[in-house]
Amino acid sequence: GNSVTQMEGPVTLSEEAFLTINCTYTATGYPSLFWYVQYPGEGLQLLLKATKADDKGSNKGFEATYRKETTSFHLEKGSVQVSDSAVYFCALRVRAGNNRKLIWGLGTSLAVNP
Amino acid sequence: NAGVTQTPKFRILKIGQSMTLQCTQDMNHNYMYWYRQDPGMGLKLIYYSVGAGITDKGEVPNGYNVSRSTTEDFPLRLELAAPSQTSVYFCASSGTGDTEAFFGQGTRLTVV
């Protein structure tokens, strides 16, 4: 079946530290991969996505590369800010007819201290 | 640019009561979803819809019902509320192709 595994949180970093949140997946077919972010008290919003192998998604200084050989889509940022404190969700969607359901990881909470 | 709008934002229910969580989107999206989010448990899909008049069960549909009479609206009905339904509920929608899902702000429901 299809599944997403994220590293467990919480992750606590100091401002300007390097961030990596690991995400690996299992999927039938050729999935699209997503990172969503949830700020406190809000709904989820798309952070970045990649739709095929070797694509790199990027947004707001965050990056993730679709690695088919390692079935991974790790999220990275070179220098985090306090405002990046949030919960980050990795997700995949497999193309299968009308199926548009997303398969979600459990989320990784990030706290950035000044 | 309203996007996905959920109401209410907060609600306290007594055991056995019923209520409807409202969700409407103004992006003409065919796909709509209801999720619940419990602490440390990620998102669980309750029901989804691929278009007006078509709904299907997700991972955790028991205790809930939905309808989709229009493209815009996708209400979630709780009958006979139970403490296990205490959660944050999110409605989302997406278009065709590899487009992103847009989420509402959530409804925090407590059943006491």
Image (spheres, rainbow, N blue to C red):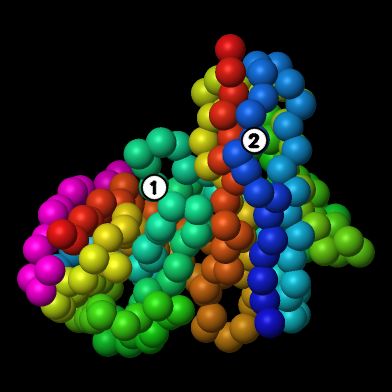
Numbered circle sitting on residue A11: 2
Observer-nearest of B83 and B24: B83
Q: Position of residue B72 (x, y in %)?
A: 25, 67
Q: Residue furthest top?
A: A114
Asked if residue A77 lies in the magenta stretch, the reply is no
Real-space Cα separation, disc 1 to disc 2, in angstroms: 20 Å
Disc 2 crowd, CA 10 A, few/some/many (<14, 14-19, 20+): some
- Secondary structure type for disc 2: strand
Residue A29 vs residue A82, the one in the foreground: A82
> Split into 4 quadrants, where in the image is the C terminus of chain B?
bottom left
Identify residue type, mark 1.
Gly
Q: Is residue B98 left or right of residue A16?
A: left
Relative to A8, does residue A13 appear above or below in the rendering?
A: above
- Residue count near mark 1 (Cα–Cα under 10 Å), binned few <14, some 14–19, many ≥20: many
Camera-near label (1 vs 2) is 2
Subunit ID for the residue under disc 2 = A
Q: Earlier in the sequence, mark 1 or mark 2?
A: 2
